[in-house]
Structures are given as structure tokens and as C-alpha cells.
Amino acid sequence: MAGDFRLMGVVNVTPDSFSDGGRFLEADAAIAHGVRLADEGAAILDVGGESTRPGAEPVSEAEELRRVMPVLEGLAAGPDHPLLSIDTSKLAVARAALDAGAGLVNDVTAFRAEPGVAALVGERGADCCLMHMLGEPRSMQANPRYDDVVSDVKAFLEERLAFALGEGVAEERVLLDPGIGFGKTLEHNLELLRRLDEIVAIGRPVVVGTSRKSFLGSLTGRAVEDRLAATIASNVLAYARGASVFRVHEVAPVRDALAVAAATVAEPWTTSPTATTRS
Ligand code: HH2
């Protein structure tokens, strides 16, 4: 059932991210951007130093640290800063980020790239986001195939959740993400959004990242900078199907849209079989 929601604002410290590459490469610009997103209502700021767009080249550990650390330190120094998330798959980057005040590790490989990240998250009592991706960014959009995309993604997330718990991560610390656009065709993305309730049924909060992604461009014919309306529509629909964390580049407009969606659909409806009418 739809309920509370949190906005995760994207702070990309990269030269090559698909929608904002190069805009926040300087630490000061990235910090200012994060502060603005927090002011607009982001409960989480997701700081990333490596693009995962289709075809992206990997970044070295040293370079990733150089990009993200001053930004995390700057954001952590602010009063009442939101939960800081590090978007990384590297153990050394995750450790340094947690040391600097991050409280969430957003790993698009769900602890497959460096499995030691799981034990680190467990030891530190941090939150984590485990995302589904088929293949790796360099090649993931080359003819992705599934038996049934929703069942396959669900089985993957259940397996990665079990792995994380086995490494000492507390269940209440885990968020799950179907990985919109990561090794998926337009139809795969739509099917995942349509049947998102099946992923929600795993029982952990579900994160969705549709913001400005290319499937929205395919549907609307819009360039990457003109996909806000499409982003809002996809987030509202994901909310209605039970997603609770929304990873977006533009926080304020999505927050407004979700506030209206929440007021309209969330309460007092319930999916409980014993209370199917309005109270
Ligand atoms: N999408 C991107 C990056 N990280 N993390 C999660 N959990 N879910 C997502 O959907 C997700 C993610 C891609 O978006 P962006 O960061 O804007 O682009 P790039 O990877 O090119 O930096």
C-alpha cells in the first residue's frame, strides 16, 4: 500500500553522468547543489563519483575518492544535513564515505562487485540500497533478456537481501531497487513499474530511479533536460504501486507531485482483506 515517501536527491560529481555530467564536478558546486536539494525536501542526498550510464567507463578508486570525499565532508559539516548516501560499489570508497558521515551505501551491483561492502555496512550499522542490474554498465543495454523481468528481478533482490543478512546487515537497514534502465528495454522498465507491487511484496522499502532516464525519452521524444514531466508521472505511478524512496535530479517538483499523490491515494485505503472499505 502507498504510504510515506522520501526523496533521494542526486549529487553527481562526475564529468560524464548522462543528464548532468560536468555540472557539479567542482566540490563547491556539488555541495551547493546538495544543500539546495536538501532545502527542497530531499531526505537523502546520493553522492556519486562514477557514472553508471550505458557505456560508461569505470573510474579508479583514487579518482572516485578525489571526487566524492570533499563533497561528503562539506555536506556532513552542514547543520541538520539529510541522510548522506554514497553511490559506489567500491569497498574503500564506501569505508571512507561512512567515516566522513555517510549513513547509506547505494550499491548498484548489490554487493557483487566487492562483496566485502556488505560486512562493512553490517559492522557500521549503516543503511544500504541493493539494486538490480543485468550485466555491467559498459554492456548492459546490449540486448537484455529475461524469462519474466519482474520475477527475475525479484528473485535476484531476494538472493542479494539474503546475502546481505548473512554478512551481518540488519534487515531493517536494507532498501531494494529494481534498477530502472540497468540492462532493461523500454518494455522491461514499463513492466517493472506496472508490477512494482510484486517487488514491494518482498517486504523492504523500494527505491525507484526513473529520473530523466532514456525510456522516458523514448516515450515522449524529449531530450534529457526536458523529461521532468515524464519523471513526475513515473514517480507518481511508482508511488501508487508502493515505492517509498524516489531518486531524482529535481526534488521540489517531484516532492509536490508525491505530496498530492500521497494525500489522494494513501489513506485511509488499505489492501488488508479485513478492511477493504473506507473508514
Ligand atoms: N540510477 C543511476 C545511478 N544510481 N542508484 C539507484 N539505487 N537506483 C538508480 O536507478 C540509479 C542509481 C543513474 O542515474 P545518474 O546518477 O543520474 O546517472 P549516472 O549514472 O550517469 O551518473
Image (spheres, rainbow, N blue to C red):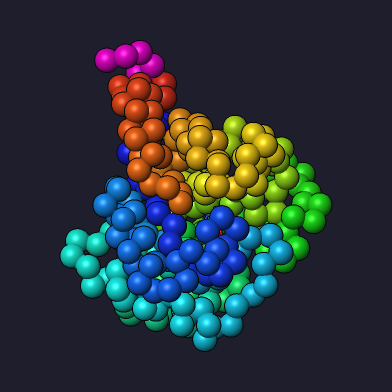
When the figure is inspected, residue 61 is found, relative to residue 275, above or below; the finding is below
Q: Which residue is at 55% across, 36% downward?
A: 230
Up the image or down, 103 lies above or below 263; here it is below
- Relative placement, left or right, of 34 versus 60 is left
Q: Is residue 111 visible from the viewing direction of this image?
A: no
Percent across and percent down for residue 46 are: 42, 61
Q: Position of residue 172 (x, y in %)?
A: 36, 55
Specify the farthest residue to the left: 79
User: As drawn, is 143 to the left or to the right of 209?
Assistant: right
Res 189 quadrant in image: top right
The answer to whether residue 237 is above or below residue 276 is: below
Instruction: Please give the name of the residue rendered at 58% of the width and 82% of the height, measured from the top-left corner.
Output: 60
Q: Quadrant of the C terminus?
A: top left
Q: Main secondary structure of the magenta part?
A: loop
Which is nearer the eye, 104 or 11? 11
Could you tell me residue 113's position as x and y percent?
Answer: 61, 73
Region rendered in magenta: 274-279
Q: Position of residue 250 (x, y in %)?
A: 42, 47
